[in-house]
Each structure stands twice: as C-alpha cells, then as structure tokens.
C-alpha cells in the first residue's frame, strides 16, 4: 500500500484505488489528504488530530464517506454534521473502542489502547484509539500502547509531544520492534530538536531491528 504523510499526525493510505485517512487534524493539509477518501479513522478528540469542520464538510459532501472514532468524537461529529437538516450523516459515523476489528475502505482494522497519554494531572485524560491497518501500519495516536498478539510491520512513531520524553519514544520503538518506522506528531519540532530525537531513535532502534526513515509533509512510501 502507499502511505503519504501530511504535516503532524495525518497519514493517507491508498490500496487498489481506495483511500483511508487517519487523523486529519488542523495542523495538516486536511482537504488534500481527504480527497477521494472513503474512510477516516480518528484516534482522539484533540484538534491536531481532527479538524471537525473539515471532516463534517467532507461527510456532508460525500455520501460514501465513513468515519470511525472514539465515542465522544463520534457524538460530536454526528451532532454537527446533522445540524441544518443533513439527515443520514449519523449513519456513517461509528464509535469504536479498543479490542475491535472491522473493515474500512477495503482495509482491515484492529483497535488498541483506550486513553490518551497523561499530559498533567490537572489536564483531563481523553479516550484514544490506536489503529493497526492490514496487519501492517500502526498509528497509536497520542499513546505508547504496544499492540498485543501481532507483529507490526510499519510503525508510525509520535516523535515529539507535550506528553512524552525522548526515552519514552525510544522505548516505544524498541518495544514494538517493527522493521520500519516513520514519524508522526512532529509539528512542534524545529530541525535542531528533530535531529536530536531522530538520532536516538535511529541509532537505538537499529539495535533492535527497526529502520527509521523520516518522511516530510506530502512525501510517500510503499509499505
């Protein structure tokens, strides 16, 4: 399948002419990422992972588009999408939790996790779902939950976040031990900071069989 990274946390997957998008957030080139998409997977409610207005507009404009998201996100999308008399949109928004399996746009999906990583005790923890696509690509959202019982082939690594430190990023890569890894959640890094984090991930990950490769916004790779 073809994987295209967009700014920050959004990725687009294409296979057999079908398109699946994960986390089209406000930091990303959302309209471009969603062009021709049949399904959207949302990991959690934070705006850098879902541009609600853009997703609602896409749902209203394309009767073939389906969205899968944690229950709170799904409820918000249904309410906003159906305001103004857009009936039937709610039927194309599904709430998902951890431990589920389903198909979306011709891709097989398995879900993991349950909650967002802790930022601070005074900041509420929200639901977060990690998605494994076609037993290959794993997008954890904002968490370091390692999928159980499967071997991930392509890991999307949250390379930098307000809720993480470099050691945790490295331990996540080591724990998953995927042959390939690419960055997500890098919108807050400058080049100096990126180089430090990626240097550690590349060097230590290689000891455990993981080849890390940076992807810039709009860059694609076959996985």
Image: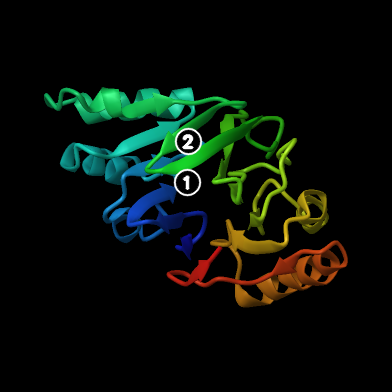
| Picture residue at 58% right of the left edge, 62% below the top | 186
| Picture residue at 61% right of the left edge, 72% below the top | 214
The quarter of the picture where residue 33 lies is: bottom left
Q: Which residue is mark 2?
A: 45
- Outermost residue toward the front? 16
Quadrant housing the C terminus: bottom right
Is residue 43 in view?
no
In the displayed structure, 71 sits above or below 105; it is: above
Answer with left or right where residue 64 lies relative to residue 210: left
Query: Callout 1: helix, strand or loop?
Result: loop
Answer with left or right where residue 203 lies relative to residue 109: right
Is residue 152 in view?
yes
Q: Which mark is residue 49?
A: 1
Label 2 and label 1: CA atoms lie apart by 7 Å
**10 Å neighbourhood of mark 2: few (<14), some, or many (≥20)?**
many
- Outermost residue toward the right? 207
Q: Position of residue 160 (x, y in %)?
A: 66, 57
Answer with left or right where residue 165 lies relative to residue 154: right
| Cβ–Cβ under 8 Å for marks 2 and 1 | yes
Q: Nearer the viewer, residue 191 or 146?
A: 146
Q: Nearer the viewer, residue 10 or 211?
A: 211
Q: Position of residue 4 (x, y in %)?
A: 46, 64
In the displayed structure, 125 sits above or below 11; it is: above
Q: Position of residue 125 (x, y in %)?
A: 62, 29
Q: Position of residue 171 (x, y in %)?
A: 82, 52
| Picture residue at 36% right of the left edge, 42% below the top | 39
| Picture residue at 28% right of the left edge, 39% below the top | 65
Answer with left or right where residue 24 lies relative to residue 169: left
């Amino acid at each position: 399948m073809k994987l295209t990274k967009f700014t920050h946390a959004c990725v687009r997957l294409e296979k057999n002419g079908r398109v699946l998008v994960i986390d089209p957030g406000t930091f990303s080139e959302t309209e471009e990422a969603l062009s021709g998409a049949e399904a959207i997977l949302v990991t959690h409610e934070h705006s850098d992972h879902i541009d609600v207005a853009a997703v609602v507009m896409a749902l209203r404009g394309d009767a073939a588009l389906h969205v899968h998201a944690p229950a709170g996100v799904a409820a918000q999308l249904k309410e906003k999408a159906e305001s103004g008399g857009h009936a039937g949109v709610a039927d194309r928004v599904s709430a998902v939790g951890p431990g589920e399996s389903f198909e979306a746009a011709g891709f097989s999906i398995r879900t993991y996790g349950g909650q967002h990583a802790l930022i601070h005790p005074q900041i509420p923890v929200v639901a977060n779902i990690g998605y494994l696509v076609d037993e290959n690509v794993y997008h954890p959202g904002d968490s370091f939950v390692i999928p159980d019982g499967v071997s991930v082939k392509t890991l999307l690594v949250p390379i930098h976040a307000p809720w993480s430190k470099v050691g945790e990023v490295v331990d996540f890569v080591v724990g998953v031990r995927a042959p390939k890894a690419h960055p997500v959640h890098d919108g807050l890094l400058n080049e100096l900071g990126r180089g430090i984090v990626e240097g550690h991930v590349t060097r230590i990950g290689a000891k455990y069989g993981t080849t890390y490769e940076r992807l810039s916004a709009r860059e694609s790779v076959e996985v």
